Amino acid sequence: MKALFKWLGGAVVVLLVLGVAAALILPMVINPNDYKGEITQVVRDQTGMTLEIKGNIDWSVFPWVGLSLQDLVIDDPQQKPLGTLKHVSVKVKLMPLLSKQLDISTVELDGLTLNMVVDKNGQPNWLPQPKTAGTSAPVPPNVPEDGHGNGSTPLLANLNVAGIAITDISVNYQNIPARQEIAITNAQLQTGAITFGKPFTLTSSFMVNNRQPAMKAEISLNGTVTPDPEQASYTIDNLKLSVTPAVKSDAETLVVDGRIAAKGSDVNGKVSVAPLDLAAFMQQMNLPLPKLAGGDKVLRKVSLGTAFKMDKNSVTMNDLFAIVDSNELKGTFAVTDLKTQAITFNLKGNNVVVDPYMPVAETAAQASGSTTAPSTVPASAKAPSSSKTSTADDVIIPVDVIQTLNVHGKAELASLTVKDFRFDNPNLEIKASSGYAQLTSLNAGFYQGMIEAAAAVDVRGRLEKAPQISAKADVKSISIPALAKQLSDLEKVTGQANANLKILSHGLTQNQLTRGLNGTVDFNIADGALLGTNFNQMVCGVIAKVRKERSTKTDWPNQTSFQKLQGTVRITEGVAHNNDLTAALAQLNLKGDGSVDLVNQMMDYHVGLTITGDTADDEDSACRINEKYANITWPVLCKGKLGDSGLCGIDEQRLGQVLGKIAEQEIKGKLQKKLEDKLKDSLKGLFN
């Protein structure tokens, strides 16, 4: 037995000596450069490409299995230059492979240039040429997705790489059908030692040059990477991505910081974008910047960030914040179902002003290509210019967008300004799915009062071609003078308004929506006045005319005050009708009826003024009337184009009827006086 073990031990020693000797002798005996032709032929047979190895091939067997190549040139299947490589080198330690451990020296790759082209037929030049009939590609080994050979033991127990050094890489990409050309130059990538389960540093950078649109920038990515394939876990800490436009000076750099961790299909992390002058950055990157109402005063300070979680079917963002100039939002945002694009959000914000970020229409001069000297006046301060193509018949309901929405969200703001209308402390909720979008509630302070509103747009089914719009609102104690600063149609009214509104319309364009408008509006205005018109003065003038006297008063106030004005407006196919307008004035009662055609912007409205006292004005004798005329209704007509001056005046047609009634009462009064006198004379005769 002793002799047997001694013999076996000697055999092992001999084998080891022979192995070491072979590892030392083989590289001396076998010159891999002698096989360049065979290597080139194999590449041609397998890919259709032509490989030329101009430099030396160096190799080793023990203790490292290594390969080093110099000066490679490869042509695509059409024999056009595909790429060149100055140097590539990799070495693997032999003995650790016996225990399924991979020890690799620093992987070096230098001077790679690739010319990647998608030809006019859409065929990439870097793909192998299709094989001829009778040949087949080798079948890859059946390796489970989890990287385990038998379901329990990893194919690779551990990986140790001394580092990766990739330098001087250039990639030129041209897509002829898409008319796209991109060049990546001076690409670099370096890492520290890579070992499963342990962090290593990674630094990379490259220059990207896009031809159309012309854009050139330097991009860098740094971080600390921890790979753990056994746990299917990968982490990047201290992540920093920066994009710097290649401009001569004052470059605005986009910087993204964060941390990303992935385990299986689950990804979580935290990212943030440092404060950025987005307008300047996009200009330096030659990226299109939309024309906004705020001109060059907006998008000057933009930053955002969030903590996020992702899986196969959802994305959740917590601790979300977004800052755009002075507007700030924070809260949560989630895509709960990536397949259906179901979105939920809950946001809070400060005084958010939307108007400066609204797109502006291109003017006729801009559309024709004319140029003018740059203006120093902010775009928000300039008078709006008319659009060359925008009309009331343009589609304003985005049906396609509404059909794709699947949203449920809430928002609370300190204030919200839209179209110059300010809502204080608005609290709103929106829902949208399957072509039905709703503002389910909006509660807010509104010009010293309150508003509660809801609205909906329905484009489902047959309504796709004629969307249905509905809205309701309840407003309380709104200051009309405050609101009139944004709504010029109310400039001639003062007071506090209360209203209840329910409207319904259908259509795709502004004209269609106006013509299809139906609904009711109940309103009342307390402690107000109609500015620019004095109904007392109008009535006084008529009375003086009847009395054939001249009014001596000249300081009539240019308004008609009232304690309360109320009524109901019924809208039918774009025409608003009102038959019950009433108002209690200082010395008059007002009643009104008529219509306002919203489609043609025309008014035809009648107002009746009834004197409530025995005089219209104590200071002007020409206006005094007897009590028997107190119930006479004096007619006023408001007719013409909305917005025109001088719409209201005495209704000449009805005035004749009024004067006839006055004359009738005068005659009746005189007859009654005569009868009374005769009756007195008769009574005197009876008692004498």
Image: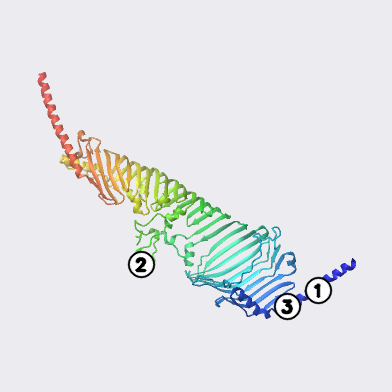
Name of the residue lying farthest toward the top: 687
In which quadrant is the C terminus drawn? top left
Q: Kindly identify the residue that appears in the image at 78 percent across and 74 percent down.
A: 20
x, y percentage for residue 659? Answer: 17, 39
Q: Which amino acid type corresponds to the residue marked 1 in the rendered image?
A: Val
- Front residue of this view, candidates 354 and 680: 354
Mark toward the start of the polypeptide (2 vs 1) = 1
Q: Which amino acid type corresponds to the residue marked 2 in the rendered image?
A: Ser
Distance between the alpha carbons at the discs numbered 3 and 1: 16 Å
For residue 27, which numbered disc appears in the image?
3
Q: Secondary structure at mark 2?
A: loop
- Front residue of this view, candidates 140 and 333: 140
Q: Secondary structure at mark 1?
A: helix
- Front residue of this view, candidates 274 and 156: 156
Which colouring convention does the figure follow? rainbow
Label 1 crowd (10 A; few <14 / some 14-19 / many >=20): few
Mark toward the start of the polypeptide (2 vs 3) = 3
Q: Kindly identify the residue that appears in the image at 60 percent across and 61 percent down.
A: 239
Kindly tell me whether residue 161 is visible in this rendering. Answer: yes
Picture quadrant of residue 113: bottom right
Q: Which amino acid type corresponds to the residue marked 3 in the rendered image?
A: Pro
Name of the residue lying farthest toward the front: 134
For residue 17, which numbered disc appears in the image?
1
Label 2 crowd (10 A; few <14 / some 14-19 / many >=20): few
For disc 2, the marked residue is 368
Q: Are marks 2 and 3 in contact (CB under 8 Å)?
A: no
Mark toward the start of the polypeptide (3 vs 1) = 1
Q: Are marks 3 and 1 in contact (CB under 8 Å)?
A: no
